[in-house]
Amino acid sequence: MTFACQQPNYSSEGKIRCPCKQCKNESFLTPDEVNVHILKKGFTPRYWCWTSHGERISHTNIDVDMHSVLNACKKTSKFVPYKRIHYLPLIPRLQRLYASVRSAEHMRWHYENHREEGVLCHPSDLEAWKYFDKLYPEFALKPRNVRLGLCADGFTPFNQGKPYSCWPIIITPYNLPPELCMMTPYMFLTLIIPGPHNPKGEIDVYLQPLIDELQLLWNDGVITYDASKKQNFLLKAALMWTINDFPAYGMLSGWSTAGKYACPICMHKTKAFRLNNGFKISWFDCHRQFLPRNHSFRKHKDAFFKNRIEKDHPPPRLSGEQVWEMVNDIPKITEVRICKVPGHGRSHNWTKRSIFWDLPYWKHNLLRHNLDVMHIEKNVFENIFHTVMDIKKKTKDNENA
């Protein structure tokens, strides 16, 4: 204020520009009025460098100030990532299962409670579980080692015009009793993959931190405290299989579930064909080859394909080692930007080598991928219902069929 009153304009007129919030240096008032305005209405926002009261503008200072402001903006600006994941580590949560006396006792249930032969009430009764125990007896003899299952599915969280995809990855420990295996507290949300697009085959990139943890749990293990026995032990874990719908099967396994070779069992020996009018792939009458050799349906000429009886054997079921030989030379999606496999769509449907093959025991798993029954039952029921009720635009009985 003293500096402004020393300027020539004040000496001749007795007024100065008012820098209050309302006047904004546009009104000329006496010094006393300016003081009152500033006290009542406040100072002009962001008026840091005074230029309206006879000050000399220093270009050097302005350049320095702007340079410092730009540097500050660069330091505080947030870079928007091209892709992102939310990863919740698995190992601490497995260790917490043994930190509680109650849950630690349940983690040995699969080993201490034997069922009658032929009774299926828990994943440990499956042939795949028993086959794994035979291959890795040292792992099987330690009941506190954890068997895991992985579930993956995508959904659209927002009902908006813009597409958005969210893929949760859930890990479930199968050591627990059957009534606890599928309870919410024991279903570990490990990965969330949000984004405007479906990750598709690139889901392996997001699964990398989980695979790293699974490799650590298998190769080295982690020291864990068992509250029920009050002792430390070396915790190891193995991923037994995945559970997903058919499209997610293709994303996780690396075998595309679209086109003529969509069936991962028949592979190149499929009997699928393309409709002449609808131009869609049909698997009609492909199932009879899986029936017993003496089944009456094999000889039907009218109920299925006209004038055709089924004499072929079903396609052979490949072992994990045989599948590994097929995909061993195929690159992983994490190694190349675009994975192009020669012969895709003509002799096979491989699109990549799945990241699950990085697990040392994966090729020895008898059952690697499971299909979610809920999706299959729902889709089959809807197609049959829409066709029987002749619902427009949803029935499969049309001219193209």
Image: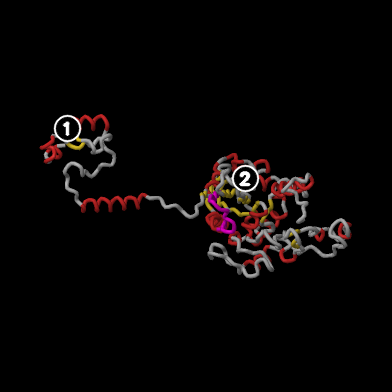
For the question of whether residue 186 can be seen, the reply is yes
Q: Residue at x 17, y 47 (%)?
A: 56
Q: Which residue is mark 1?
A: 30
3D distance between C-alphas at marks 1 and 2: 84 Å
The quarter in which the C terminus is drawn is bottom right
* Magenta span: 190-204
Considering the numbered disc 2 on the image, is that residue within a helix, a strand or a loop? loop
For the question of whether residue 220 can be seen, the reply is no
Considering the numbered disc 1 on the image, is that residue within a helix, a strand or a loop? loop
Q: Is residue 89 above or below residue 33?
A: below
The quarter in which the N terminus is drawn is top left
Using residue 144 as the reference point, say whether residue 20 is left or right of it: left
Using residue 184 as the reference point, say whether residue 123 is left or right of it: right
Of residue 324 and residue 137, the one placed in the foreground of this image is 324
Report if residue 276 lies within the magenta region.
no
Q: Residue furthest front?
A: 13
Q: Is residue 270 above or below residue 388?
A: below
| Residue 107 circle label | 2
The kind of residue tagged 1 is Thr
The kind of residue tagged 2 is Met
Q: Position of residue 250 (x, y in %)?
A: 64, 58
Of the residues under marks 1 and 2, which one precedes in the sequence? 1
Judge the density around disc 1: few (<14), some (14-19), many (≥20) Cα neighbours within 10 Å.
Answer: some
Q: Is residue 93 above or below residue 262?
A: above
| Residue 58 circle label | none
Of residue 110 and residue 397, the one placed in the foreground of this image is 397
